[in-house]
Image (tube, grey):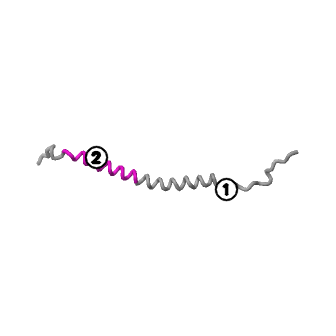
Amino acid sequence: MRQVLPSQNQGQALLEFILLFALIIGLSFGLLVLVNGHLATRWTAIANKIVGPAAQPRNDLTVKLR
């Protein structure tokens, strides 16, 4: 069996960390872009319902003075 000397493996942990970090950042960014677009659409729809045109006033709710 051949032994692997530590000097030949020295940068592998750093390289694996960098690749894993890049993968996590890429997935996070992709999910954020995907969710943010859908979330913005929902917020706009809710805001438009709140701020939308007022209902027509009802005539039977008028105040009558004596």
Q: What quarter of the picture does the C terminus occupy?
A: top right
Q: Amino acid at mark 2?
A: Phe
Mark 1 and mark 2 lie on one chain; the one further toward the N terminus is 2
- Answer left or right for 30 relative to 50: left
Q: Residue at x 39, y 50 (%)?
A: 28
Which one is in front, 40 or 2?
Answer: 40
Marks 1 and 2 sit apart, C-alpha to C-alpha, by: 55 Å
Magenta segment includes 55: no
Magenta segment includes 19: yes
- Answer left or right for 1 relative to 56: left
Which one is in front, 30 or 5?
Answer: 30
Q: Residue at x 12, y 46 (%)?
A: 3
Q: Position of residue 60 (x, y in %)?
A: 80, 53
- Label 2, residues with CA under 10 Å away: few <14, some 14-19, many ≥20: few
Q: Position of residue 18 (x, y in %)?
A: 28, 48
Q: Amino acid at mark 1?
A: Pro
Q: Is residue 38 above or below residue 3?
A: below
- Label 1, residues with CA under 10 Å away: few <14, some 14-19, many ≥20: few
Secondary structure of the residue carrying tag 2 is helix
Q: Residue at x 21, y 46 (%)?
A: 11
Residues shaded magenta: 10-29
Secondary structure of the residue carrying tag 1 is loop
Q: In the rendering, which numbered label is found on residue 37?
A: none
Q: In the rendering, which numbered label is found on residue 17?
A: 2
Q: Residue at x 73, y 56 (%)?
A: 56
Secondary structure mostly seen in the magenta stretch: helix
Give the residue number, with chain letter if any, for mark 1.
53
